[in-house]
Amino acid sequence: MNTLIAIGSLGILVLLLEIFGARKTIIPVTIIGLLATLGISLGGFSTESGPASFFNNMIVEDKYSMGFSSLFILLTIFIVLMSADFYNKEQKKLPDYITVKLLLLFGGVAMVSFGNLATYFVGIEILSVSLYVLAASKPENIKSNEAGMKYFLMGAFASGFLLFGIALIYGATGSFDMEVIHQAGMSAGVEDWFYIGVAMVSVAMFFKIAAAPFHLWAPDVYQGSPTLTTALMSTLAKVIAIGGFYRLLNGMYGNFSDGFITTIIVVAILSMTIGNIMALRQDNVKRMLAYSGISHAGFMLMALLAIPNGAGNLLYYATAYALAGIAAFAVIIAVTKNKDDENIISFNGLGKKNPVMALTLTLALLSMAGIPILAGFFGKVFLFGQMLEMGYTTLVIIAVVNSIISLGYYFKLILAMYTKSSTEEMPATSSIYTVVAVIATIINLAIGLFPDFILTMMA
């Protein structure tokens, strides 16, 4: 609860700083505020008290909410750090951009801290509206306008599914409270439209995480949005959606039917396979990472099969993926700044022009591919191991094959950096991108070497 209050207060403070003409202090104050909020969130693990609920169980604070909230805050810190240079030509709009990002974070924390479906719906709508604004935040760019419109139309359609599903669940259980819904879901006498409601809510969340076959919006929206917004969508927004989806299913329905489990498996396989195959065909790096994100959504969906024991592995995988994504996009922004596109040709010879950035991008891509000793490797090992214990051998084999396929497009970019020469000079950019990429990579390596730090938090 304190985390939500701190984030909301920080958003108001940013607007007040703009009103009083202290625009130059916005980034430092926001970073300090987010670090303090991160401390508040992590501090909850040091207390010995159990889960706490607030406002008649509207907000629930437990290890799950604190773990994912800490990840969201850390990713937002990286995004805000890069905002200082990314929006250097739009200083008048900087307070608006930062406030919208803080509102997005607020919605994300609400999505993993809810004890009532009303809170969950409010959280996801705050998240969605913030993303619509950020996707279309370049009104003079037709691609940004297209991205914002596509995302808004598809997002509104998915929100309709979510709201209708929640209405059916309420009709079957007579409550929005997750404890009541959970008891009803575990009983044999629940009304049939409860399961229809679960299915509709799941369809809405498949869209939010860009899982196949609900992924068609993602490549165009990722490519058309400003690159920093794409980084936010690919990392922060995606792990918020999967974290909220896990909590939603875990809270409202634990007695999964064979049909529902089969649906999760099919969507996971489709996401992994379609994402990887389509990524192989891309020359635009943003589109390539969009399809890569679809593939990783498939991997993370596997954790839903382990409910209620998959939270630790899901948080670990989400952390490894998001940190690698932040490092990769920091380099992409630096390399393609002031360019019309993000073609892979722009990365030719980066290993000679800027060895540090080339190395961090390489490590980020290798982590996504699941190469030891990076965190992405251990994330897959833990997740695959749990699936094998549960008897999903075929699913694990398909996932391993897809991990091998992913090496094709990741190494296409790595080879461009180290084996091809470029006649272009590296654009002059702020060193903040290098700092973000290096810090994210160091954390990625650290949790790869010491995975128990995250896994024991959720135990």
Image: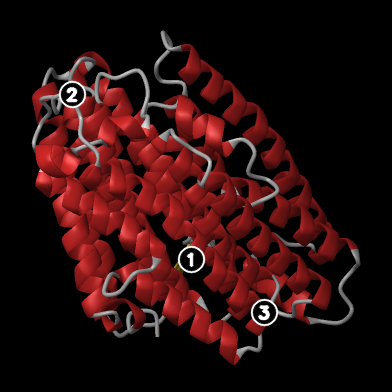
The span from disc 1 to disc 3 (Cα, nearest Å) is 16 Å
Question: Of helix, strand and loop, which one carries label 3?
Answer: helix
CB-based contact (under 8 Å), mark 2 and mark 3: no
| Image height of 425 relative to 391, above or below | above
- N-term-proximal mark, 2 vs 1: 1
CB-based contact (under 8 Å), mark 2 and mark 1: no
Q: Is residue 440 visible?
A: yes
| Image height of 451 relative to 376, above or below | below
Q: Residue at x 77, y 75 (%)?
A: 184
| Image height of 36 relative to 447, above or below | above
Q: Is residue 3 visible?
A: no
- N-term-proximal mark, 1 vs 3: 3
Label at residue 404 = 1
Disc 2 target residue: 424
* Residue furthest top in the image: 140
Q: Amino acid at mark 1?
A: Ile
**Camera-side mark, 1 or 3:** 1
The span from disc 2 to disc 1 (Cα, nearest Å) is 32 Å
The span from disc 2 to disc 3 (Cα, nearest Å) is 47 Å
Disc 3 target residue: 394
Specify whether 247 is left or right of 365.
right
